[in-house]
Image (cartoon, helix red, strand yellow):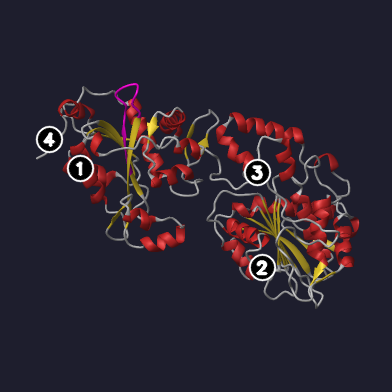
Amino acid sequence: MIFWRNKNGTCKPAHNWKLSFPGAWFDDKAAAWAVEFVETCKHQKGELAGELFILADWQREITRGIFGWKRPNGTRLFREVYIEVPRKNGKSTWGAALGLYLLFADGEPGAEIYSAAADRDQAAIIFGVAKGMVEQDPDWTAASENFVKTIVYQATGSAYHVLSADAPSKHGKNSHGILFDELHAQSNRDLYDVLKTSTGSRRQPLLIMFTTAGFDKHSICWEVHDHAIKMMNGTISDDFFLPVIYAADETDDWTSRKTWKKANPNYGVSIKEDYLKAECDKAQVTPAYENTFKRLHLNLWTEQQTRWLQMREWDACALPAVSYDKLKGRTCYAGLDLASTTDIAALVLLFPPRTDEEKFEVIPFFFIPEDGLHDRVRKDGVPYDVWKRTGLIQTTPGNLIDYRWIMLKLGQCRIDFDLRVLAFDRWGSQKIVNDLCDEVGFTVDPKEATVRRHPLLIQFGQGFASMSPPTKELLNLILGRKITHGGNPVLRWMAQNMIVKHDPAGNIKPDKSKSTEKIDGMVALTMALGVGLSVPAPAPSVYESRGVLSI
């Protein structure tokens, strides 16, 4: 899917987006000068190191478009350029050359140019290439002063700096040119907003965003990506914004060489077919790498950064439906993830099968503070209010989760089911653990749990040693269709959000820090399965033979 294409040298975007700015005109001389300057730069790495950087056709077309289209007063038309391409398509070298053009050749007195990114190492990539280009050119070296993080062009008093989201101060800028690398990696919109608003006093500022596709659809990158798509579909108009996206389509065969070539404009140049084949082969045998391949090499926005599970597999386990009443009296294990008192708490019950024909059955409960619920809906874009109305989540009074509501639910579960073990994460759990023992009849003593048949409380570690076996087994149960969750939409949302962290030994565990949204229910389910697999089963409960008595 190529959303930008040169039409007979006029550099007009493709598809439904049409240039409508009154009096806009194309300055062929300015376009040619920009291309000529860029192609005097030299490669810094790889087999082409030291050779002149010759733009690929697609890069030349876009460069001409950026610097050729003018307003009636002669200044540049485009003020923002969004370039979304897969990895290894030459964007760092191209970006460095464009940055040097803005510094040396754009004629802006006191220009401030910034290479920006989520962290300083990423921001330094394009700047480092640009600095190396300057050092290879005697004329540029003589005309500038090079420092570790700055290049100063003395003739115009202009400077090219490195700037990242973790910089102590990002305000007070007066930006003429911004090269924003890997926009998808921004954890929030702060740096983007600061830099975009810093261009207000310049006569022809230019913000160029380079990125691959991301996975967080609540991010600033998705916001800009969505803006670009709507422009190209003709839904909205923005004459000052140039959208460039090279990507596969969702319906394309992601294992096909034809798809690889379609998504990668530098296919066979800076990105080799044998490299893509090796990466694709890896993705086909390693489910956790499939989304990584699609996102980084086909430029497809994915559901997770590192896929733990394909959602079609999860959805295939929605049946048979799970009935609370029909499970009464059955043995179960539970996991409790309290997260934080201002967020979502999850309690998940797991009922093991009694015969080879039965499946593991899952009943989840979710708790969230009542205060601020509607603000949270607007902020997160998650239908907590709908889930509350339909009974899928329970709100507790106030702006913090009231653990008494969770205790009441556990007390009821103890009455309705043969609850053997409750696994919990020690973080923030000490008070509720004490209260469960004192008021609800749980115990932390395995002997008492066996003799008096009190539910046993077990602290469940969140490291690889504890979490890896049940995480892997849960995946096996899902792929083998040996578990049913009844299609609970809250738990599905959390399953879709979940990514896993790997260690060198091949262990995995849920990774809250990298998951785009909440995964507390999946963590609780994993802990429940963990204790269900590891704790020896006590003697059969009387409830399984006579059922639960109603008083």
Nearer to us: label 1 or label 2? 2
- Between residue 128 and residue 67, name the one nearer to us: 67
Q: Which residue is mark 2?
A: 237
Q: Tell me the SS state at disc 4.
A: loop
Q: Tell me the SS state at disc 2.
A: loop
Q: Which residue is mark 4?
A: 549
Which disc number belongs to residue 412?
1
Residue at point 56%, 33% (across, down): 287
Nearer to us: label 3 or label 2? 2
| Distance (Cα) linking label 3 and label 1 | 48 Å
Q: Residue 514, position in %: x, y?
A: 51, 45
- Between residue 521 and residue 162, name the one nearer to us: 521
Residue 461 visible in rendering: no
Q: Amino acid at mark 2?
A: Ser
Q: Which residue is mark 3?
A: 296
Q: Amino acid at mark 4?
A: Leu
- Mostly what secondary structure, the magenta segment? loop
Q: Earlier in the sequence, mark 1 or mark 2?
A: 2
Q: Residue 546, position in %: x, y?
A: 15, 28
Residue 385 visible in rendering: yes
| Distance (Cα) linking label 1 and label 2 | 57 Å
Residue at point 86%, 53% (across, down): 41
Q: Earlier in the sequence, mark 4 or mark 2?
A: 2
